[in-house]
Image (spheres, rainbow, N blue to C red):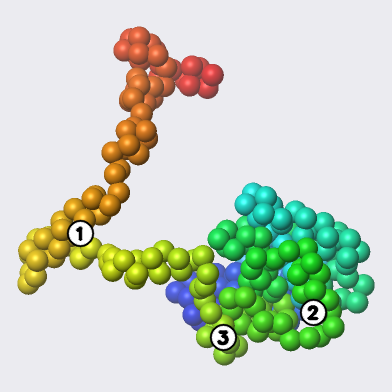
């Protein structure tokens, strides 16, 4: 913890990684961990508890060996996330944020994995498992409970939740380069650009000075013209353009009320 504190200009900034470190050692954010963080940082236990209870990645109950998170946010839910979550609850015989009797798996529905192009998505100890189905999810948790080696779709070989928490605390495990970081749908745009020979316009810092500034501006204009020829944006611009109303420019109320000065009153603003 003292090493983490030394990494920041203000030691208090180390509280978040310190709480992850507590979890990596004790399996949750314990009362002992809270008191230790508070003592080292010169905070009250209440202040540390406020942080630990605000962020959902900090757990107040002892976690299983593996944390399985099922995204049930809109897109993943529509693509099958809800069905996966229900199937896993039945298969593991546990509910949300509960742990199996053997202590191997803690199941939780999470709001978004930020991987919508691979929906529906699970995470195991915060590593991605993409394009899942109820059947593949069951196979996954069975493999975890049996102690089999499991590789993330995009990321490292699965270790344990505690080991992942130590990495989140800021202590590398040497697995940062394991597995692909991007794949599939995330790279489609890049692949199309390469096939068509597209490239980003040259950078113009706006100062118009320095060697190559004129050439950079010309290249930008040329690229913009080429892009305009390939995509007609006039329709999109017209459809997204809204008329400006007195409410937009005068802070609310009708034009007549705004003009006579009554729209800004506190009573009408509250209404």
Q: On the rendered structure, is 69 left or right of 138? A: left
Q: Residues within 10 Å of mark 1 (few under 14, many from 20)?
A: some
Residue 49 appears in the picture as rendered: no
In the rendered view, tell whether residue 208 sits above or below residue 18.
above
Q: Residue at x 45, y 74 (%)?
A: 9
Q: Residue at x 59, y 63 (%)?
A: 118
Q: Which residue is mark 1?
A: 223
The disc at residue 144 is 2
Q: Residue 156 appears at what percent x and percent y?
A: 61, 82
Q: Give the image quarter of residue 42.
A: bottom right
Q: Give the image quarter of residue 131.
A: bottom right
Q: Residue 233 appears at what percent x and percent y?
A: 30, 43
Q: CA distance from mark 3 to mark 1?
A: 37 Å
Q: Residue 179 appears at what percent x and percent y?
A: 57, 83
Among numbered discs 3 and 1, the one appearing first in the sequence: 3
Residue 150 appears in the picture as rendered: yes
Q: Give the image quarter of residue 96.
A: bottom right
Q: On the rendered structure, is 38 left or right of 84? A: left
Mark 1 and mark 2 in contact (Cβ < 8 Å)?
A: no
Q: Which residue is mark 3?
A: 178
Mark 3 and mark 2 in contact (Cβ < 8 Å)?
A: no
Q: Residue 178 appears at what percent x and percent y?
A: 56, 86
């Amino acid at each position: 913890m003292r090493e983490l504190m030394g990494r920041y200009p203000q030691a208090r900034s180390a509280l978040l990684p310190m709480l992850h470190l507590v979890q990596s050692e004790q399996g949750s954010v314990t009362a002992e961990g809270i008191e230790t963080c508070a003592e080292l940082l010169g905070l009250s236990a209440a202040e540390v508890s406020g942080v630990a209870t605000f962020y959902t990645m900090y757990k107040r109950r002892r976690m299983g060996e593996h944390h399985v998170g099922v995204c049930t946010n809109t897109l993943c839910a529509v693509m099958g996330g809800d069905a996966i979550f229900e199937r896993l609850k039945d298969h593991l015989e546990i509910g949300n944020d509960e742990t199996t009797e053997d202590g191997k798996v803690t199941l939780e529905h999470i709001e978004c994995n930020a991987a919508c192009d691979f929906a529906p998505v699970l995470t195991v100890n915060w590593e991605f498992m993409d394009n899942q189905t109820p059947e593949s999810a069951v196979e996954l948790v069975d493999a975890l409970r049996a102690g089999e080696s499991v590789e993330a779709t995009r990321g490292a070989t699965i270790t344990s939740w505690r080991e992942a928490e130590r990495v989140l605390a800021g202590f590398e495990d040497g697995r940062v380069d394991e597995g692909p970081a991007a794949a599939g749908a995330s790279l489609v745009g890049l692949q199309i650009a390469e096939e068509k020979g597209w490239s980003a316009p040259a950078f113009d810092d706006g100062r118009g000075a320095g060697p190559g500034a004129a050439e950079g501006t010309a290249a930008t204009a040329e690229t913009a013209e080429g892009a305009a020829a390939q995509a007609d944006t006039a329709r999109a611009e017209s459809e997204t353009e809204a008329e400006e109303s007195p409410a937009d420019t005068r802070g609310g109320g009708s034009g007549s009320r705004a003009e006579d000065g009554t729209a800004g009153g506190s009573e009408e603003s509250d209404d």
